[in-house]
Image (cartoon, helix red, strand yellow):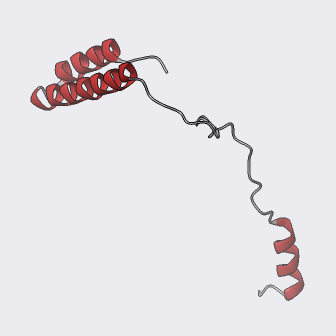
Amino acid sequence: MELEDNDLAKAAEHKRAPVPSKRCSRLRRRSAEEQSVSYVELFFDLFYAFAITQLSHYLISHLNAQGAWRTAFRSGASSRPS
């Protein structure tokens, strides 16, 4: 049994276009004034990157359940609040 043109038109009417949702952006809005980063903030970012590198190397060298548990515990100690 083939669909007629009228049936196809009715089916097309029931499909709705996706409605864009208004999400709250977590990014900082841009402003006209210049924004700078302090040296302390850069130091802590560098420290955080170094800590993640050390944790990943530890996990690679201790690739078992105990190593995963210790890496998870240590990553909790080095994580910073968001």
Residue nearer the viewer, 18 or 12: 18
Instruction: Point out the residue furthest to the front here.
Output: 33
Work out whether 42 lies above or below 13: above
Residue 69: x and y in percent read 25, 18
Residue 66: x and y in percent read 18, 18
* Left or right of residue 58: residue 10: right
Q: Quadrant of the N terminus?
A: bottom right
How many marks do you count on the picture?
A: 0
The residue that appears at 29% across and 19% down in the rendered structure is 72
Q: Quadrant of residue 40?
A: top left
The residue that appears at 74% across and 44% down in the rendered structure is 22
* Left or right of residue 41: residue 18: right
Work out whether 3 lies above or below 45: below
The residue that appears at 9% across and 29% down in the rendered structure is 61
Residue 35: x and y in percent read 53, 33
Q: Quadrant of residue 65?
A: top left
Instruction: Point out the residue furthest to the left here.
Output: 61
The residue that appears at 12% across and 25% down in the rendered structure is 62
Residue nearer the viewer, 75 or 69: 75
Residue 34: x and y in percent read 56, 36
Q: Quadrant of residue 15?
A: bottom right
